[in-house]
């Protein structure tokens, strides 16, 4: 290989309650990329077991994320769509990365601190090591780009740190075995030849962090106990309208300029959602609604959200009524993903020096 071939990898956890943030921040960004380069979209079920989960729901939520991918416009003939647990190379590479990553690096991850909360001692080791598995998900395909929401930025930086340390620690063996790729961005911190690329995040659009409808300082999240905090992708039109009507706001009308949103987290969030749903900018929205009260803006936002999400929910429901077709997509995807990850792990085992007797 003379250079890393561009390849996209991303994933969504099947933890239930897929919401507007997952859609605007991630899934909607996945769709156009499938026409620009090879893409791999995973349902990351191994991540879903790092916190309390119901085994009897996991298959259903795995199919639900797959249905959301397909309903959003991901074409499984173009993109590889599969569930993580079906390709064993993810778990194997994660173990090696657990031995590359440092305790200090993982201890600094804000998502672990938030999710473990005050009860850190009781959090699973899997939750702590989650970023190593995420690095393995990406690097098992030597993916060069990862579209994600803003909350995953720190994990992507850790993926680069792991790749960099692996490339450095094993530089001699990578060169000896002839497995290196010329470093596209030579620097004193890195050898001339790399095995793993330094993956770039793609954090794009006006909706990289959609906030809770109940609290503009917290991100919209599947695990928020209040269902009113998020718009679920399969909510009915009535539920969507109710949640937007009840969304926390302030008494002021919308400003005409973006600077006027600076201290108004809830207003900024709703304007950002409107912008993302129309494919425009916050400035465009304020040009139309500046000076208007929320009693005018909220119904317009509700109509817009329903018009965009209802067809997707209908398509998800149609797909979910036929689980065999979803499973066939996942099976085909797992075979195609495995065919890429298997030789990468063969290289990694050789680089690490494991005795191969089979
Ligand atoms: N609020 C958000 N705004 C924009 N993007 C978001 N994403 C998540 N929440 C928002 C993006 O969705 C993708 C899939 O996320 P995930 O399922 O891997 O888990 P997460 O980031 O931990 O999302 P949640 O919804 O908050 O789930 P729980 O509550 O289970 O932890 C990612 O690209 C993420 O950035």
Image (cartoon, helix red, strand yellow):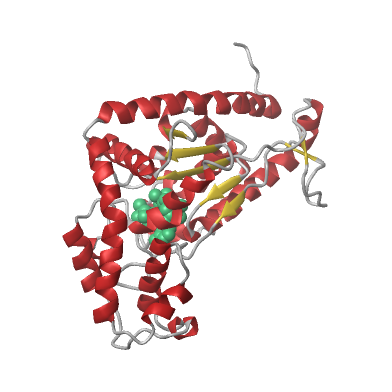
Left or right: 299, with 187 as reference point: left
- The quadrant of the rendered image in which ligand 1 is seen is bottom left
Quarter-wise, where is residue 351 in the image? top right
- Residue 232: x %, y % from top left: 27, 55
Quarter-wise, where is residue 196 in the image? top right
- Residue 352: x %, y % from top left: 68, 29
Identified at 23% across, 41% down, the residue is 317
- Name above or below for residue 137 compared with residue 257: above
Q: Which of the pair 156/127 is nearer the observer?
A: 156
- Residue 278: x %, y % from top left: 40, 63
- Residue 160: x %, y % from top left: 64, 49
Identified at 54% across, 41% down, the residue is 35
Q: Which of the pair 268/15 is nearer the observer?
A: 268
Quarter-wise, where is residue 117 in the image? bottom left
Image quadrant holding the N terminus, namely: top right
Q: Which of the pair 73/49 is nearer the observer?
A: 73
Q: Is residue 217 visible?
A: no
Looking at the image, the residue that sits furthest to the top is 358
Looking at the image, the residue that sits furthest to the left is 238
Left or right: 7, with 235 as reference point: right
Q: Can residue 350 be seen in this view?
A: yes
């Amino acid at each position: 290989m003379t250079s890393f071939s561009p390849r996209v990898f991303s994933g969504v956890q099947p933890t239930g309650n897929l919401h507007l943030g997952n859609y605007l921040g991630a899934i909607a960004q996945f769709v156009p990329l499938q026409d620009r380069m090879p893409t791999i979209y995973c349902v990351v079920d191994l991540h879903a077991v790092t916190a309390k989960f119901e085994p009897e729901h996991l298959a259903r939520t795995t199919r639900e994320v797959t249905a959301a991918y397909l309903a959003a416009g991901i074409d499984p003939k173009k993109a590889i769509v599969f569930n993580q647990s079906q390709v064993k190379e993810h778990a194997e590479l994660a173990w090696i990365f657990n031995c590359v990553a440092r305790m200090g690096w993982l201890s600094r991850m804000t998502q672990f601190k938030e999710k473990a909360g005050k009860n850190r001692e009781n959090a699973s080791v899997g939750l702590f090591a989650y970023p190593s598995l995420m690095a393995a998900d990406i690097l098992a395909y030597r993916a060069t780009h990862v579209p994600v929401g803003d909350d995953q930025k720190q994990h992507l930086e850790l993926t680069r740190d792991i790749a960099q340390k692996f490339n450095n620690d094993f530089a001699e063996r990578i060169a000896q075995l002839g497995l290196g790729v010329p470093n596209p961005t030579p620097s004193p911190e890195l050898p001339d030849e790399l095995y793993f690329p330094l993956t770039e995040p793609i954090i794009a659009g006006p909706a990289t962090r959609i906030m809770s409808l109940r609290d503009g300082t917290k991100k919209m999240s599947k695990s928020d106990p209040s269902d009113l905090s998020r718009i679920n992708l399969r909510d009915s039109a009535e539920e969507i309208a109710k949640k937007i009507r009840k969304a926390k706001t302030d008494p002021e009308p919308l400003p005409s300029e973006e600077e006027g949103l600076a201290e108004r987290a809830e207003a900024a969030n709703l304007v950002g959602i409107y912008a993302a749903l129309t494919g425009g900018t916050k400035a465009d929205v304020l040009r139309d609604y500046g000076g208007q009260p929320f009693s005018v803006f909220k119904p317009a936002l509700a109509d817009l959200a329903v018009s965009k999400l209802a067809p997707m929910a209908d398509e998800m429901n149609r797909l979910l009524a036929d689980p065999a077709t979803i499973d066939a997509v996942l099976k085909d995807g797992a075979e195609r993903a495995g065919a890429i990850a298997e030789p990468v792990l063969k290289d990694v085992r050789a680089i690490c020096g494991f005795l191969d007797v089979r």
